[in-house]
């Protein structure tokens, strides 16, 4: 029997959702299957990049914990797997903005963990983007992590381990999720309706993140890639006087505004449903969601810009087989003519240096202006 067959047998037919969620994460599958075969730990930290399957694995793992403690396992599992889930003993907390609200962590996790299950024998609390909890919330959660009721299991999901306090991480059993290989992403994206070359490009530009790869194949993702090309091309031609970087800022702002509107509507609906929130809480939460999404798009734009310059260096050096932007080879060949590969590589380094500098609250527009004029001097 193949290794996959052995693992599938170990997981069992009732854990099909867990098997599917961890199909490309063999280490995580073995760890979680072993936990279900015995007594699951009271606290887990699912650590790994976005899009690596942490969220789906957490839902499937929580469903198995609840099913094992239920008089009707199949029904408990079915309800727990729904998203959003109507199962009263599955609490799923995701940030509505850049950070989790302190009171929401206290009310929905810390205080709620003291109450016995509404049905069955277990309760599961999942905190998505755990690194987005403020230090105050993380410190408040320590006692629950150290001494939870015997019927409580906590699952923290994190894409940025540095954002979690060591005292929090050390009290959890860590389950690592690796970035998905480009070949796996290509198979997952094959039905997206894009050309094979565009799928190959998205899979490589996404750096193992399936969600990001799907974004790159969407209309907003295609427009963002075009914005990046419209920024790099003037730098190569010595024509940055038209401030091409403003298109990136406008794109990020538009996406952020959309995210703010969606978050505001969700927070208002929750407020109508009985969750206590003031008008200021709703406004602040919606603005944080918008800023967070805007920052994510800018981060992606920087990474796409660095990848383009990296690809120019590869083409100029005669190494087209390692190019990420495989659907743009003709343009890359044209731009790479007579280009010094070392200069293109240095340009990619400048992009990454500028991206890191934004973490120090530098003006985004000034930082982008300085970056592209430096690239113009280096490359034109």
Image: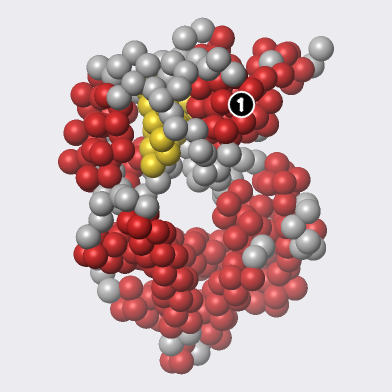
> Looking at the image, which is closer to me, 119 or 26?
119
Q: Is residue 66 visible?
A: yes
Secondary element type, mark 1:
helix
> Looking at the image, which is closer to me, 110 or 88?
88
Residue 84 at x, y = what percent? 52, 44
Residue 75 at x, y = what percent? 61, 26
Disc 1 crowd, CA 10 A, few/some/many (<14, 14-19, 20+): few
Q: Using the rendered view, name the quadrant where residue 181 is placed.
A: top right
Classify 375 as above or below 47.
below
Classify 163 as above or below 280.
above
Classify 164 as above or below 350.
above
Q: Using the rendered view, name the quadrant where residue 27 is placed.
A: top right
> Looking at the image, which is closer to me, 243 or 374?
243
Residue 101 at x, y = what percent? 26, 49
Q: Quadrant of the N terminus?
A: top right
What residue is rendered at 60% in x and 19% in y? Answer: 73
What residue is rendered at 31% in x and 38% in y? Answer: 108
What residue is rendered at 29% in x and 62% in y? Answer: 282
What residue is rendered at 80% in x and 58% in y? Answer: 196
User: How did the renderer colour the structure?
Assistant: secondary structure
Q: Is residue 256 visible?
A: no
Classify 235 as above or below 321.
below
The residue singled out by tag 1 in the image is 75
* Furthest residue in direction bottom, as rendered: 242
- How many marks are shown on the rendered structure? 1
Q: Using the rendered view, name the quadrant where residue 15 is placed.
A: top right
Residue 13 at x, y = what percent? 71, 19
């Amino acid at each position: 029997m193949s290794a996959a067959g052995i693992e599938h047998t170990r997981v069992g037919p009732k854990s099909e959702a867990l098997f599917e969620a961890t199909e490309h994460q063999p280490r995580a599958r073995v760890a979680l299957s072993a936990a279900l075969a015995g007594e699951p730990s009271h606290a887990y930290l699912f650590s790994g990049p976005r899009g690596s399957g942490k969220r789906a694995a957490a839902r499937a793992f929580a469903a198995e914990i609840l099913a094992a403690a239920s008089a009707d396992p199949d029904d408990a599992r079915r309800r727990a797997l729904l998203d959003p889930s109507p199962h009263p003993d599955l609490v799923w907390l995701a940030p509505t903005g850049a950070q989790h609200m302190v009171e929401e962590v206290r009310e929905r996790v810390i205080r709620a963990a003291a109450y016995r299950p509404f049905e069955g024998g277990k309760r599961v609390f999942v905190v998505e983007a755990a690194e987005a909890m403020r230090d105050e919330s993380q410190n408040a959660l320590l006692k629950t992590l150290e001494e939870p009721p015997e019927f409580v299991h906590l699952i923290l999901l994190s894409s940025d381990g540095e954002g979690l306090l060591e005292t929090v991480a050390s009290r959890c059993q860590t389950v690592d999720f690796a970035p998905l290989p480009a070949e796996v992403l290509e198979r997952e994206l094959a039905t997206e309706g894009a050309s094979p070359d565009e799928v190959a490009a998205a899979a490589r530009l996404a750096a193992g993140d399936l969600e990001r790869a799907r974004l790159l194949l969407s209309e907003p993702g295609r427009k963002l890639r075009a914005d990046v090309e419209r920024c790099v091309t003037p730098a190569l031609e010595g024509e940055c006087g038209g401030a091409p970087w403003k298109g990136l800022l406008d794109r990020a702002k538009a996406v952020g505004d959309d995210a703010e509107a969606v978050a505001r509507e969700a927070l208002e609906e929750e407020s109508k449903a009985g969750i206590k929130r003031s008008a200021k809480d709703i406004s602040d939460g919606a603005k944080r969601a918008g800023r967070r999404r805007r920052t994510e798009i800018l981060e992606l734009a920087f990474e796409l810009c660095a990848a383009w310059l990296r690809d120019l260096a590869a083409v100029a050096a005669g190494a087209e087989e390692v190019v990420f932007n495989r659907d743009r080879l003709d343009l890359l060949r044209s731009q790479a003519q007579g280009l010094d590969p070392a200069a293109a590589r240095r340009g990619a380094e400048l992009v990454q240096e500028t991206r890191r500098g934004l973490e120090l609250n530098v003006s985004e527009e000034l930082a982008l202006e300085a970056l592209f004029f430096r690239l113009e001097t280096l490359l034109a």
